[in-house]
Image: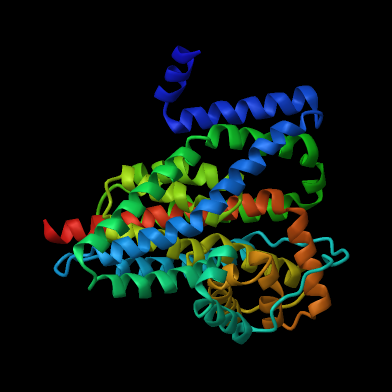
Amino acid sequence: MKSLFSKWQSMSLVKRIIVGLVVGILLALAFGDKLPWITLLGTLFVSALKAVAPYLVLILVVAAIAMHEKDKKTNMKTIIGFYAVGTVGAAISAVVFSFLFPSTIQLQEGEKGVSAPGGVTEVVTTLLNNIVSNPLTALTEANYIGILAWALVIGIAAKSANEQTKAVIQSASDIISKIVKWVIDLAPFGIMGIVYNTVATTGLSSLKDYGQLLIVLVSCMAFVALVLNPIIVFVTARRNPYPLIFTALRESGVTAFFTRSSAANIPVNLELCRKLGLNKDTYAVSIPLGAATNTAGAAVTITVLTLAAAHTLNVDVDMPTAILLSIVSSISAAGASGIAGGSLLLIPLACGLLGIPNDIAMQVVAVGFVIGVIQDSCETAVNSHSDIVFTAAAEYMQDRKKA
């Protein structure tokens, strides 16, 4: 057993995840939903990631700022610029895909128990309220905007602390990082449980009526990941972007696809940044910030589903309106983390721009929940792996300028 365990540990995490994925599918096909304890493995894994992530973000950001040396530069301005360009670019790509391949949807009853924001003002208000949230509440509710805000304040204050205090902060950072590594090592078993549950209980039969819509959504997100993001990296860093792109997709996108949670993927991304040898002072801030605001996949979802509603209702959308929709979708997507339900509940806001009634818009939200098993997985994978891509690209760009 000891030899088997050592051999298992010597395999790369990606290979172990693939093994877990295959075993989960085979068990689902062989036993159906008769093995609930396997589903429990997935639930426990995602819960563990979500539980540790808020404290990891708080401690790492505080440590990064407190330990930051005056003359040592970070790339946060560049990364934030990449996040903005990537999100707007994704929304514009979604407009183009929707115009080239117009989709319609079968409207149905709205999703019960959900409500959409009334406008961009409400989205911004929610974000501002999250920033000034009570720090303990922010931690317990996994409000990453609030956690980041308090971590910045505490980190700045800790810069003037004595060396003993800074040593304690650094030790806390090392301890939480080790705990996270332990949790990530359980990813193969967690993903086995998630895949087993999806295949055994959900299936894909309910998605057949939305085939074209899903193809447009997934194709656009693939375009963002494999074309748009590489162009941004190549133009700014002047290097072949695909080794970075494929590494980020393999080691970040895969786990994000199955956990369907950018928050749960924060520890995975931080560990990947460490493996890539990136500047910890930068990625300790950029990765949690990206999980909250770098939402290209959400911008695609909002834009494609809104234009699908417009096509269904024969609403004429001209190019200036479509560009405005892209901007609204990008702003809305950046605020998606501050609203229960994520990107789908921002659809009525975008629909309102085209004069689509709220009751129809909420039916579009319901369609989003039906296709969510694919849509949300792809969206999260695009969002999360982009955090890695842009954080690394900013560092590569800085290295190029120094050369």
Name the residue located 49 percent from the left edge and 61 percent from the top edge. 291
Which residue occupies the foreground of this view, 32 or 183? Answer: 183
Q: Is residue 3 visible?
A: yes
- Is residue 161 placed above or below 206 in the rendered structure? below
For the residue pair 88 and 253, the one nearer the viewer reads as 253
Res 122 quadrant in image: bottom right
Quadrant where the image shows the C terminus = bottom left
Above or below, comparing residue 209 to residue 29 in the picture: below
Q: Position of residue 185 (x, y in %)?
A: 48, 35
The residue sitting at the left extreme is: 403
Q: Where in the figure is residue 36, as x and y percent of width and height?
A: 76, 33
Above or below, 123 relative to 266: below
Looking at this view, is 161 or 317 the one in front? 161
Q: Residue at x 28, y 51 (%)?
A: 278
Residue, far right:
109
- Residue at 76 percent across and 79 percent down: it is 356
Q: Position of residue 11 (x, y in %)?
A: 42, 24
Q: Is residue 89 left or right of residue 67?
A: right
Residue at 55% from the left image edge and 78% from the top image edge: 127
Find residue 157 and report its image quarter: bottom left
Residue 84 in view of the camera = no
Q: Nearer the viewer, residue 260 or 267?
A: 267
Q: Is residue 171 left or right of residue 379?
A: left
Q: Position of residue 285 (x, y in %)?
A: 37, 63
